[in-house]
Amino acid sequence: MLQGCSKGEARWIWTAHSRQPIRAIIWHFLHFLSVAVAALAVASITTFVTIYRDMLGPVPLPPLTLLALRFQPLWLVLVIIFAVVTLYVMWRWRLRPAPDGISVVLILLPAAQAAFLFVALLQPVVGTIVRQNPADPLIQPAR
């Protein structure tokens, strides 16, 4: 029993703190997952360059794709910064969840980076597939 606490107060303290580590584990997993997805997006840039060479040839790339390709070192630095900050937050708030504002920012920023990179990298591939496959004649309206 805790010193200076009645039995009812000790029970309340135990139940209030027993859920905190589970919530912290869930938040930490989401932090790690968002950084891992952003790291995979950055790592896939070189793969998409070879796909563009084979599939598109001399066709110019869209501006959004060029932005993603030209600033690959910047995307890598951002992922490293996100990873270091995430590790610090996970270490700093080991047994309890980080404040909600910090947690949301640490999940949304890497997720936004990954979403931007995937959209920018898939834009030429999807455009080529759409251009090469004519529309189904059954779907086209009658003239």
Image (spheres, grey):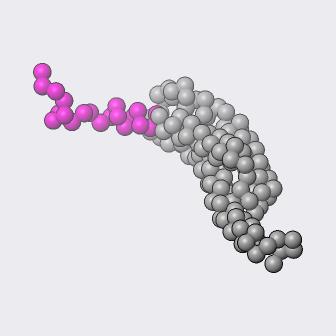
Residue at x 68%, y 47% (from the top left corner):
100
Q: Quick one: quadrant of the C terminus?
A: top left
Answer left or right for 100 relative to 4.
Answer: left
Residue at x 55%, y 28% (from the top left corner):
64
Assess whether residue 42 is covered by the magenta stretch: no
- For the residue pair 43 and 30, the one nearer the viewer reads as 30
Residue at x 60%, y 34% (from the top left corner):
68
Q: Which residues are magenta?
A: 124-143
Answer left or right for 61 relative to 39.
Answer: left
Whether residue 14 appears in this view of the structure is no
Relative image position of residue 115 (x, y in whole percent): 55, 40
Q: Quick one: quadrant of the N terminus?
A: bottom right
Relative image position of residue 6 (x, y in whole percent): 79, 73
Residue at x 74%, y 41% (from the top left corner):
77
Relative image position of residue 27 (x, y in whole percent): 65, 56
The vertical placement of 46 against 58, above or below, is: below
The vertical placement of 28 against 100, above or below, is: below
Whether residue 65 appears in this view of the structure is yes
As drawn, the residue found furthest toward the right would be: 3
- For the residue pair 27 and 112, the one nearer the viewer reads as 27
Asked where in the image residue 93 lies, by quadrant, the reply is: bottom right
